[in-house]
Amino acid sequence: MQKAKLLVAGAAAFATSSLLNVAQATELEVTHWWTSGGEAAAVKVFADAFNAGGDSWIDGAIAGSGSVARPIIISRILGGKPMGATQLNHGRQAEELVEEGLMLDLTELAEKEGWKDLVRPSSLLDSCTLDGKIYCVPVNIHSFQWMWTSLDAYKKAGIDAPKDWNEFVASAPKLREAGITPLAVGNQGWQTNGMFGVVQTGVGGVELYVKTIVERDAEALRGPEMAAVWEAYGQARDLDDPDNSIQNWNDATSQVITGKAGAQIMGDWAQGEFQVAGQTAGVEYDCLPGLGLQPALDTGGDAFYFPRQDDDEKTAAQLRMASMMISKAVQVDFNLKKGSLPVRGDVDLEAANNCMKKGLEVLANPDNIIPSGDQSFSLDTTGQLEDLLVEFWNNPDMSPADAHDSWASIIEEAE
């Protein structure tokens, strides 16, 4: 009889708990541009965790890249139709929205949970901070400074896979003889601009990157070291398929996965595509941080902002979502799917693959960490740089010297 009473009491408690969860359940629309296979698997980690807490994740994926999605996201917020949460890159992309008072202040939550003690490197949280207040939750560390090589393509060509950029350039003729495009590229501005930053860091080194991108030193911007970087980028242009019609980055990654291309210069999010394809680092593909030349990675990545709502229940749900996204278990599960690194310095990454471990080793030395372009330039400046790099990549008549001059001018005039 006592056991029966306990069971009834337990059932009643469960029912009461369920009713409370239903009462607290709130729908939040979440906008993002994660639509590739690997990205969708990562988003599902967030959605499942949020839903498990009793709320409801309404997915608002926007097809295309961030450059397509960001204007739509910003327009909705400015137009008075804000979503519950939105992905942006941590940096200056939401600066004006924050200044206009359109983003939820997360400072109280961040202080309560000790984000400043957990987030590494500290620059990630700094990029979410304006006038001493925190307005976003960083969810990963993404670095663009990677080159991904197809080991199957090199086996087909009968040569060893390259260990650095110079060996890769030297291997290009053999790849072409085997019917393999040396370098897979997506024809979008953010991709060509990102590739340039990787070549700049790998060929020119960290010191040159800091002088030009962070300090905007006029002599460094126009000096011989940058001229050499532009010549190397011209070499990269010559390694693309002249009839290339690829647009999306993940379609270019697929060329590497299938062995149709020897390599791709792309951020570590490409790793999610290899995982979805069932490939293993060191077996079917390999990774070269800093092009194998410079052990340097930037600390860009993604963050979630929460547009202010005129609804206390939605505001409470926004805070629950922010807390969930930076929680220890979710950080591990999400980033293993995404191919990125967690922002928390206290998580166990024993399950990380070889490429993620390479990234962690590079980031362990503060001297190897560089700021991303998103953290250095306004959206307007970034747009100008992307337009220039697209023009250079698609116009073989534009010389590296001419592009170098235009590039330096854009940075010299940047806000």
Image: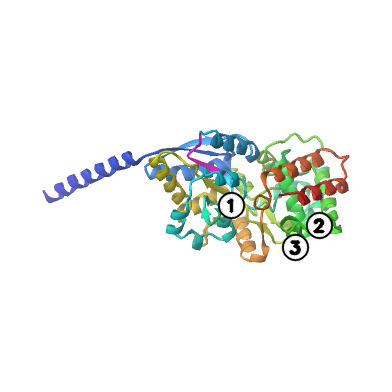
Of residues 180 and 139, the one nearer the viewer is 139
**Counting residues from the N terminus, which is met first, the one under dot 3 or under dot 2?**
3
Q: Is residue 292 above or below residue 104?
A: below
User: Are dots 1 and 3 in contact, CB under 8 Å?
Assistant: no
Q: Looking at the rendered structure, which numbered label has been put on residue 207?
A: 3
The answer, for residue 278, to whether it is visible in the render is no
**Mark in the foreground, 1 or 3:** 3
Calculate the distance from the C-alpha at mark 1 to the C-alpha at mark 2. Answer: 34 Å
Q: How many numbered circles does the render carry? A: 3
Calculate the distance from the C-alpha at mark 3 to the C-alpha at mark 2. Answer: 14 Å
Residue 169 point in image, percent of width and height: 81, 51
**Judging from the image, what secondary structure is the residue with disc 3 in?**
helix
Q: In the image, is residue 154 part of the stretch drawn in magenta?
A: no
**Judging from the image, what secondary structure is the residue with disc 2 in?**
helix
Q: Looking at the rendered structure, which numbered label has been put on residue 340?
A: 1
The amino acid pointed to by label 3 is Glu
